[in-house]
Amino acid sequence: DTEVTQTPKHLVMGMTNKKSLKCEQHMGHRAMYWYKQKAKKPPELMFVYSYEKLSINESVPSRFSPECPNSSLLNLHLHALQPEDSALYLCASSQDGTLYGYTFGSGTRLTVV
Amino acid sequence: TQLLEQSPQFLSIQEGENLTVYCNSSSVFSSLQWYRQEPGEGPVLLVTVVTGGEVKKLKRLTFQFGDARKDSSLHITAAQPGDTGLYLCAGPAAGNNRKLIWGLGTSLAVNP
């Protein structure tokens, strides 16, 4: 299994809603990442988990809350988002670090209304 | 601050033409990676180059890593409409192997 699976594919939520994005990989990768991407721009790093511990938080607002329940799963909990948070949210994993590249999921297209 | 500069930013060509995309920096990178991304999908890793001077081929795509490990290029021969997408180069941040530095991308359109 060489995939990173993200659910849901699309999500529309109101500014008062609470929702979660899910990511799963079964490649035995020990680093997992959340990225945010706006159209025609490169991905922007949000969080990095290494060996199930949060190792990087790129000063992301607290309305985004990551969770890593085990080595295969990564969640992103969303609460009280703003319309400017609308974007493609990407999960990625890597064997260990960034030297040889990431495997990305297909993303969740989030629209905040 | 490490930066990766990609050029050109946009490219629109006819099927069958050749093209080259560049990824340049003033900093040394331990590796450089190339990704292709289609609309609404995540980036897909095409190749990682690690050794200065390295050349890798992937069908009609040829990737080079500069001798000094500061730059890379992607050459596509006889482009096809299926090559259309956003091409991104990226490299590990110095001193932090959990972060990637990204180029701004090259948006390629191959017209039939």
Image (cartoon, rainbow, N blue to C red):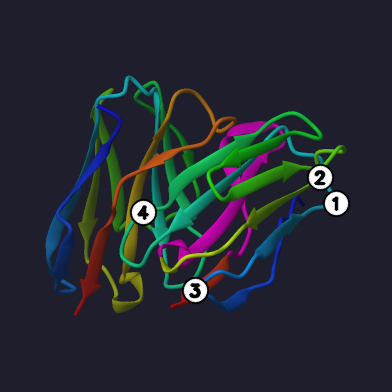
Q: Is residue B51 above or below residue B71?
A: above
Q: Quadrant location of the C terminus of chain A?
A: bottom left
Q: Is residue B83 magenta?
A: yes
Numbered mark located on residue A54 in the image: none
Of marks 2 and 1, the one in the foreground: 2
- Tell me the residue that label 2 is attached to: B70
- The answer to the question of whether label 2 and label 1 lie on touching residues, with beta carbons closer than 8 A, is yes
**Majority SS type along the magenta span:** strand
Of marks 1 and 4, the one in the foreground: 4
Marks 2/1 same chain: yes
Q: Position of residue B70 (x, y in %)?
A: 81, 45
- Tell me the residue that label 1 is attached to: B26
Q: Tell me the CA gap for discs 1 and 4.
A: 28 Å
Q: Is residue B36 above or below residue A27?
A: below
Numbered mark located on residue B42 in the image: 4
Q: Tell me the CA gap for discs 3 and 1.
A: 31 Å
The chain containing the residue under callout 4 comes to B
Marks 1/4 same chain: yes
Please report the bounds of the magenta region as a residue range.
B82-105
- Tell me the residue that label 3 is attached to: B110
Query: Mark 1 or mark 3, which is nearer the start of the sequence?
Result: 1
